[in-house]
DNA sequence: CCGTCCCGCCAACTT
DNA sequence: AAGTTGGCGGGACGG
């Protein structure tokens, strides 16, 4: 995705490697990276590269010319040799960090290989050569190869976008630097930006915690809000028109506001005492990054030129806007942009202004999360931010846990603590139930999602793809209690998986999110998550009594966009329930009010905004195209897709009818989705297979049957897609009849025994799609005996994530990078490099397919859920659970991904 | 020639 | 004092 920029560059650069162009995708990038590392090595003493040098930069066989320093280093490093790597590793243990680095470089190749495993890089292969390899030389990377963007991709590839909550992924800067074969300094650049988005947080020296993207949406939301408050939009407009100097007023005013909000923004800092003081950092990349992102989020066009951004940032941060400063700012912005691009949040474009063409970046990340749903959801679920929610504390605890490696139990507690408020107790149960149901329901079938997404929903595909379990409701407790699997707990806040539009599923449990993700076309399973999102396309479950209003909306929403749909319906009801719970129980209580109504409008807005033509700026071709897509969609989408979606069939009462909102959303979604989709496709070609299938399915619009809640359901309403071919709905058994639905809902308890809820076989039966394809089609048996009871329903198979997920590995690291799918433990490792590491996926989301595979492998009850305790933890820890399972399985690596492990190990050793 | 941005010096901060 | 962070900008790369 973002990669585009990179890719473009890469593509452009004929240079070497080109091979890698692909960088766009993680793969290439990774490869490059991998290679790069070796290449990178240049710095490293090794310069083994000399050879490399020969290749590239042609002229300068040596980089050294560039930086003398490197030269010095180089000498140190020996030519690559396997042994050398080992040595390096060993040495790594040694105190000398720098030495480590050198070592690192050495390692890099190895690690790279990991990636390489997945993606053999020609270049990498060479490494074996010891450097002498001319290949290496070739590989020798051009600057591009060394680019921060690639480096960042590599970095990201090491970590699951949606790590199991429990999993505390600590990032050792040294470790990472060494593994990536770069100087630590470079890692700081990356980490600082990631930190700005709360993807990571500093735990201690050289130690960062990897949070993944759970919080991304939330963070973006906040940033957006802040940006709005600060009126960045105005500023941007102002500059765009003038580009000249800033008005003092804006700057100052903004500064103030900005500062005010800054606190909020600085999650990490606030959260982490350890975090260094902000002082210096006011100007830091981190803040700049946040501001930069705000500009995008506030921008109607979603396009920000560097110069404008620099001007705005200068003003705020610094009074003087010297030209030199300006230049410096721009430089920094490039750094930031590279990272953001790697995150697939922006991509480079060119804006043609009156003056001429300017470099600019376009936001391609989630937009819709916009406050609408997200806010609410987030707040609700996570309780996070503003309200005094414990979120931070939780975060802290989490971090702490992560940092400390606290046992999952600890984590759990923390997690639980959050949500768990005294009140909760029963409410929790209820909530959990609801949530569960919601999840289940929420989980749309991939088809639907794909449909919507296919068109546009994809926004977040990256995220979606990654699917990792999104954060569950804030009420982790509820979830936890009943279903530990709920991952979110871990990320109470985070969960905002960036569902496109509003899907925020705060309410929705993981499943929902997963569903959304699934929408993305991938069924993902979080290893940790107990619940697997089953891509059953059409099943929707509405939890809580539906208010007609809500129901409609929800329905409509559903019809609209995947995300929305899911979110809304779930939200509506689940939200209600959740809200109640929250209100009652949780601090989190969000703002129930915010709920649906607000969301809708916002969605509209957003859509509108998006649609809004570019301001003065002229978009590049690409951009223009995109813009077109964006603009056009509304009408299109609304009419067709939406209707389709909404069409209700006889069966049960028809719930929804498309609403304008829906249309609007849809349009938006489509827009975004298109963009993303394409990207995703690229990225996740492998996975895409599945997704593609799904996409194909997308065409199919689900019709929903509204099933009145059975008595036992506690007011839960289910919507089933009428079209759902395979599985007729069977309502049987008392309150909770077993239903044949695309999705299975199973009481957690029931699940425990069963390794897999979601059976591939079933899917095969049901789904037309090949087994390999997403099961979305598959019908699931929906038995919810326990539903009424507190027992949560789980969809999907937690356990499914079999340790063997290794199979999955097919996934490209890219994906990971992009937040795409997190592979199962196995995958994780593969992706990450974990080669060495046993495939233990921590919470990496897995594709259903994978799951299926895994599922094939029966899980032991242990694995399934293991002890309730764990389960609890799991919430966040659902992942953890997975880990536990894995452990049980024999994977030692618990939660930590191989990479992580490595880090830990290394760190520990080093430390 | 110019946009992009790598690289690493070195200062602010921590420990 | 040693180590960690990260601001900063020279200057190379790449087109």
Image (cartoon, coloured by chain):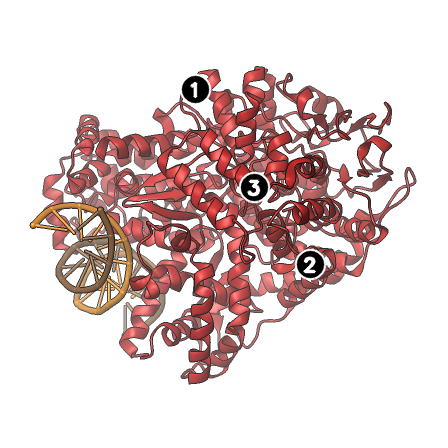
Chain colours: A red, B brown, C orange
**Point 31% across, 37% down: residue:** A123
Q: Callout 3: residue from which chain?
A: A
Residue A146 position, x and y percent, is 29, 49
- The answer to whether residue A759 shows anywhere in this view is no
Q: Quadrant of the C terminus of chain A?
A: top left
Q: Is residue A747 left or right of residue A182?
A: right
Q: Callout 1: residue from which chain?
A: A
Q: CA distance from mark 2 to mark 1?
A: 44 Å
Residue A306 position, x and y percent, is 41, 69
Q: Nearer the viewer, mark 2 or mark 1?
A: 2
Q: Secondary structure at mark 3?
A: helix
Residue A275 got which mark? Answer: none
Q: Are marks 2 and 1 in contact (CB under 8 Å)?
A: no
Query: Which residue position holds label 1?
Result: A891
Q: Identify which residue, A825 or A736, lies in the foreground.
A: A736
Disc with the residue nearer the chain's start (2 vs 1): 2
Query: Which residue position holds label 3?
Result: A465
- Same chain, labels 2 and 3: yes
A324 to A627, vertically: above or below: below
Q: Quadrant of residue A652?
A: top right
- Same chain, labels 2 and 1: yes
Q: Quadrant of residue A777?
A: top right
Q: Is residue A334 left or right of residue A44?
A: right
Q: Secondary structure at mark 2?
A: helix
Query: Which residue position holds label 2?
Result: A594
């Amino acid at each position: 995705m973002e990669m585009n920029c990179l890719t473009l560059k890469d593509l452009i650069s004929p240079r070497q490697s080109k091979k890698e162009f692909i960088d766009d995708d993680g793969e290439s990038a990774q490869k490059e990276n991998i290679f790069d590392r070796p290449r990178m090595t240049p710095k490293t003493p090794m310069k083994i590269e000399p050879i490399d040098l020969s290749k590239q930069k042609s002229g300068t066989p040596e980089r050294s010319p560039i930086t003398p320093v490197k030269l010095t280093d180089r000498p140190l490093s020996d030519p690559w040799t396997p042994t050398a790597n080992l040595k390096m590793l060993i040495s790594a243990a040694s105190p000398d960090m720098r030495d480590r680095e050198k070592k690192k470089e050495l390692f890099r190749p190895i690690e790279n290989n990991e990636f390489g495993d997945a993606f053999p890089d020609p270049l990498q292969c060479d490494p074996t050569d010891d450097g002498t390899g001319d290949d290496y030389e070739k590989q020798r990377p051009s600057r591009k190869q060394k680019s921060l963007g690639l480096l960042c991709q590599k970095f990201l590839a090491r970590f699951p976008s949606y790590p199991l909550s429990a999993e505390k992924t600590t990032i050792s800067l040294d470790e990472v630097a060494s593994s990536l074969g770069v100087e630590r300094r470079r890692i700081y650049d990356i980490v600082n930006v990631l930190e700005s988005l709360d993807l990571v947080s500093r735990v201690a020296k050289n130690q960062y915690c990897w949070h993944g993207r759970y919080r991304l949406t939330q963070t973006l939301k906040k940033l957006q809000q802040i940006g709005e408050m600060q009126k960045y939009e105005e500023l941007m407009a102002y500059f765009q028109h003038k580009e000249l100097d800033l008005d003092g007023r804006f700057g100052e005013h903004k500064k103030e506001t900005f500062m005010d909000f800054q606190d909020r923004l600085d999650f990490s800092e606030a959260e982490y005492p350890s975090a260094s003081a902000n002082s210096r950092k006011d100007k830091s990349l981190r803040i700049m990054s946040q501001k930069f992102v705000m500009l995008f989020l506030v921008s109607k066009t979603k396009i920000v030129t560097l110069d404008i951004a620099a001007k705005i940032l200068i003003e705020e941060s610094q009074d003087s806007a010297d030209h030199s400063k300006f230049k410096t700012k721009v430089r920094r912005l490039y750094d930031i942009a590279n990272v953001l691009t790697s995150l697939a949040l922006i991509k480079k474009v060119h804006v043609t202004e009156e003056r001429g063409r300017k470099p600019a970046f376009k936001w391609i990340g989630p937009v819709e999360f916009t406050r609408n749903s997200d806010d609410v959801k987030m707040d609700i679920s996570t309780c996070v931010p503003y309200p005094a929610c414990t979120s931070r504390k939780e975060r802290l605890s989490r971090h702490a846990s992560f940092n400390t490696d606290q046992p999952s139990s600890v984590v759990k507690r923390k997690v639980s603590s959050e949500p768990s408020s005294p009140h909760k107790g029963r409410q929790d149960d209820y909530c959990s139930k609801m949530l569960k149901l919601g999840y289940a329901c929420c989980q749309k079938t991939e088809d639907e999602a794909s449909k919507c997404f296919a068109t546009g929903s994809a926004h977040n595909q990256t995220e979606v793809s990654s699917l990792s379990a999104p954060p569950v409701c804030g009420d982790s407790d509820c979830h936890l209690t009943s279903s530990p699997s709920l991952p979110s707990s871990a990320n109470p806040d985070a969960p905002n998986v960036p569902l496109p539009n509003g899907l925020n599923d705060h309410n929705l449990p993981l499943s929902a999110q997963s569903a959304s993700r699934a929408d993305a076309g991938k069924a993902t399973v979080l290893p940790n998550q107990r619940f697997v999102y089953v891509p059953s396309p059409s099943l929707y479950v509405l939890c809580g009594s539906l208010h007609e209003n809500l129901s409609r909306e929800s329905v409509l929403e559903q019809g609209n966009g995947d995300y929305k749909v899911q979110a809304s319906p779930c939200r509506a009801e689940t939200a209600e329930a959740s809200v109640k719970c929250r209100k009652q129980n949780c601090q989190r209580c969000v703002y129930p009010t915010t709920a649906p109504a607000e969301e809708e409008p916002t969605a509209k807005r957003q859509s509108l905004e998006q649609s809004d033509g570019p301001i003065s700026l002229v978009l590049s071709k690409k951009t223009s195209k995109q813009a077109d897509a964006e603009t056009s969609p509304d009408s299109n989408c609304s009419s067709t897709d939406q209707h389709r979606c909404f069409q209700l069939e006889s069966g049960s009462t028809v719930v929804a009818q498309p609403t304008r909102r829906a249309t609007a959303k849809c349009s938006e979604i489509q827009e975004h989705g298109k963009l993303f989709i394409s990207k995703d496709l690229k990225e996740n070609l492998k996975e895409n297979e599945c997704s593609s299938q799904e996409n194909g399915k997308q065409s199919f619009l689900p019709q929903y049957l509204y099933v009145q809640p059975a008595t036992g359901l506690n007011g839960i309403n289910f919507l089933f897609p009428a079209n759902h071919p395979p599985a007729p709905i069977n309502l049987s058994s008392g309150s909770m009849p077993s239903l044949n639905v695309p999705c299975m809902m199973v009481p957690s308890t029931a699940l425990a025994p069963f390794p897999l809820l979601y059976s591939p076989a079933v899917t095969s039966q049901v789904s037309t799609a090949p087994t390999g394809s997403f099961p979305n089609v598959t019908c699931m048996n929906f038995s919810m005996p326990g539903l009424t009871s507190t027992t949560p329903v789980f969809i999907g198979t937690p356990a499914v994530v079999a340790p063997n997920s290794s199979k999955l590995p097919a996934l490209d690291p890219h994906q990971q990078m992009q937040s795409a799918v997190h592979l199962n433990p196995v995958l994780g490792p593969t992706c990450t490099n974990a080669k060495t590491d046993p495939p233990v996926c921590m919470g990496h989301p897995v594709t259903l397919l994978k799951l299926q595979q895994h599922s094939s492998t029966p899980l032991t009850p242990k694995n399934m859920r293991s002890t309730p305790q764990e389960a609890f933890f799991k919430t966040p820890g659902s992942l953890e659970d997975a880990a536990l399972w894995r452990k049980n399985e024999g994977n030692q690596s618990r939660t930590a991904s191989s990479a992580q492990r490595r880090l830990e190990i290394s760190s520990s050793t080093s430390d």
